[in-house]
């Protein structure tokens, strides 16, 4: 019979649970509250339970870490993969795994270098998604009616923006109050940007035409809220043009890359979104002056052009002199040319008739008939083979064509619907533009017609005057230019008459002209029709 071995020494026996809890008490008593610096590794976001599990590592070791659900919601700094942090918490053990871990109560950046590394990594990742692509950016409106500002309502920034807007061009300003620093800053700024974009165009609160996200200067940690991923995504998704004005000129945040325009300061942002009203008024006044003087200058230039062209126009005789001479010369040569042409054609006809004989024609017709039969047989065979090949190809193509035609018809139906919509829009715009242009052209035409009537000599004739021309059609402007017996052409408002001058009065003795057809004091009349 074998007896059990007696225990060696006086060491007490421990159960696994007792030993595990004893070690836990020892570790928690010795390291109740610690600060551990390391790089976050293995973080995949919160667990379905709300707790977060990851590790802290450095060059020589790895430490498991856990953040309970209630603590995770209060963290100022959320865990991110690869981020170097200082974790504050208590060290404990996990009996179910025979390991130790730190229960984190607070996370801090491990210096400015860690913050910059985190921002660089976030910037690279967001740039890879195309959020900073210049093609996404839109131009600022020239003169917005409503300006939305996302900033603190109590700081100096909003006063600077309102002051600059009042100096340059007063506009309506809508302020969405947010915290620009602290735990909830990023969420409030992102919600403000999306809130402005969600406003309806015709709602009681007008939708801004441009947004300004502004904050004064501060440390790198103070400006972290504007580098938050949620803020950057909201700025990139904004349909309203957005101006980033965070910090001073040397401060750079990630929203600066996603915004349509970056302003060095909040005051500079206000200057970017509106022009100077006084400059606009001066420009409009100068353009108005030029516009008022332009018609007069155009009319004077056209008048000079018409006068110059009138002097350059030749007479009808000068234009027709050369064609008349060529016509006379051709008429002289035509009989001789017709005779020579008839003789030449008669000679050619006689030569061709000599070559044509019945036997020669019959022999040539037989040769041509043989060639025709041979070519016809070959042509018939070739056509049959070609028809067979084309029939095979047609059957193959017809199947593909039917499929392609069906797809093409569907595509054309969609395209035609879209084109009809575009055509309807363009038609309405074209009708409005054409109506405006026709109205302007009618007004210009009426003005030019009135001016032409005022400047035409026919208006003078209508008032009882007459235009006197000599036999060459030149205007007679003085009595001294009229000689006795000269034929003259008189143009009145209702027609023309011819006259012969019998005499002329001297210019130095003006007197009242007698009425036509009667003499004054037995004197003969000036014109005898």
Image (tube, rainbow, N blue to C red):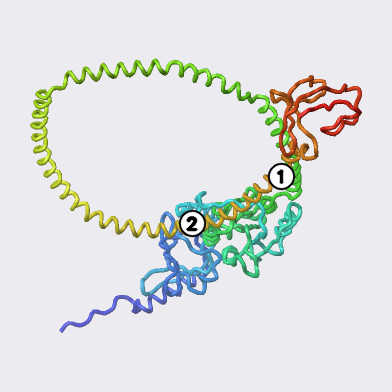
**Residue with the mark numbered 1:** 447
Residue 76 position (above or below residue 527): below
Q: Seen in the image, is 359 located left or right of residue 78?
A: left
Say which quarter of the image contains residue 207. Answer: bottom right
Circle 2: element type: helix
The picture places residue 163, in percent across and down from the top left corner, at 75, 56
Q: Is residue 183 visible?
A: no
The picture places residue 323, in percent across and down from the top left corner, at 52, 21
x 79%, y 20%: residue: 484
**Residue with the mark numbered 2:** 422
Say which quarter of the image contains residue 474. Answer: top right
Residue 13 position (above or below residue 478): below
Q: Is residue 353 visible?
A: yes
User: Is mark 2 in CB contact (under 8 Å) with mark 1?
Assistant: no
Say which quarter of the image contains residue 381. Answer: top left
x 74%, y 26%: residue: 488
Looking at the picture, tell me which residue is in the foreground, 108 or 346: 346
As drawn, the residue found furthest toward the bottom would be 1
Query: Looking at the rendered structure, which numbered label has been put on residue 214?
Result: none
Disc 2 crowd, CA 10 A, few/some/many (<14, 14-19, 20+): few
The picture places residue 216, in percent across and down from the top left corner, at 67, 56
Looking at the picture, tell me which residue is in the foreground, 239 or 68: 239
Disc 1 crowd, CA 10 A, few/some/many (<14, 14-19, 20+): few
Query: Which-is-in-front pick, marks 2 and 1?
Result: 1
Looking at the picture, tell me which residue is in the foreground, 178 or 40: 178
């Amino acid at each position: 019979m074998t007896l059990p071995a007696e225990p060696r020494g006086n060491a007490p026996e421990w159960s696994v649970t007792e030993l595990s809890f004893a070690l836990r008490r020892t570790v928690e008593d010795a390291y109740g509250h610690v600060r551990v610096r390391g790089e976050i590794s293995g973080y995949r976001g919160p667990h379905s339970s709300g707790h977060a599990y990851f590790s802290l590592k450095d060059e020589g070791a790895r430490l498991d870490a856990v953040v309970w659900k209630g603590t995770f919601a209060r963290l100022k700094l959320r865990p991110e993969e690869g981020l170097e942090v200082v974790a504050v918490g208590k060290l404990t053990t996990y009996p179910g795994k025979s390991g130790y871990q730190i229960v984190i109560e607070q996370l801090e950046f491990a210096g400015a270098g860690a913050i910059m590394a985190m921002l660089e990594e976030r910037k690279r990742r967001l740039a890879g998604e195309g959020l900073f692509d210049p093609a996404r950016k839109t131009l600022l409106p020239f003169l917005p009616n409503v300006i939305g500002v996302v900033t603190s309502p109590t700081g100096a920034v909003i006063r600077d923006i309102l002051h600059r807007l009042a100096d340059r061009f007063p506009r309506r300003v809508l302020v969405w109050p947010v915290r620009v620093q602290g735990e909830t800053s990023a969420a409030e700024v992102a919600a403000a940007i999306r809130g402005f974009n969600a406003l309806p165009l015709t709602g009681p609160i007008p939708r801004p035409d441009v947004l300004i996200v502004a904050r004064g200067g501060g440390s790198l940690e103070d400006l972290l809220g504007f580098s938050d991923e949620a803020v950057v995504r909201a700025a990139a998704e904004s349909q309203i043009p957005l101006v980033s004005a965070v910090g001073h000129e040397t401060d750079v945040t990630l929203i600066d890359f996603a915004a349509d325009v970056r302003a060095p300061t909040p005051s500079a942002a206000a200057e970017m979104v509106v022009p100077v009203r006084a400059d606009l008024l001066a420009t409009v006044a100068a353009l108005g002056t030029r516009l008022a003087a332009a018609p007069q200058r155009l009319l004077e230039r056209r008048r000079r052009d018409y006068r110059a062209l009138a002097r350059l126009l030749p007479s009808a005789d000068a234009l027709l002199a050369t064609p008349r001479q060529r016509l006379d010369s051709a008429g002289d040569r035509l009989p001789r040319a017709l005779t020579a042409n008839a003789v030449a054609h008669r000679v050619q006809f006689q030569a061709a008739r000599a070559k044509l004989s019945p036997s020669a024609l019959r022999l040539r017709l037989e040769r041509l008939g043989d060639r025709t039969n041979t070519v016809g047989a070959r042509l018939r065979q070739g056509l049959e083979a070609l028809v067979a090949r084309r029939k095979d190809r047609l059957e193959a193509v017809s199947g593909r064509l039917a499929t392609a035609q069906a797809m093409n018809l569907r595509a054309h139906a969609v395209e035609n619907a879209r084109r009809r919509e575009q055509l309807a829009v363009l038609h309405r715009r074209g009708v409005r533009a054409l109506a405006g242009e026709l109205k302007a052209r009618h007004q210009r035409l009426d003005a030019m017609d009135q001016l032409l009537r005022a400047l035409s000599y026919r208006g003078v004739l209508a008032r009882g005057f007459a235009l006197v021309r000599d036999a060459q059609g030149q205007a007679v402007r003085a009595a001294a230019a009229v000689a006795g017996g000269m034929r003259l052409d008189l143009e009145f408002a209702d027609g023309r008459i011819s006259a012969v001058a019998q005499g002329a009065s001297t210019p130095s003795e003006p007197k009242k002209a007698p009425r036509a057809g009667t003499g004054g004091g037995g004197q003969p009349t000036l014109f005898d029709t």
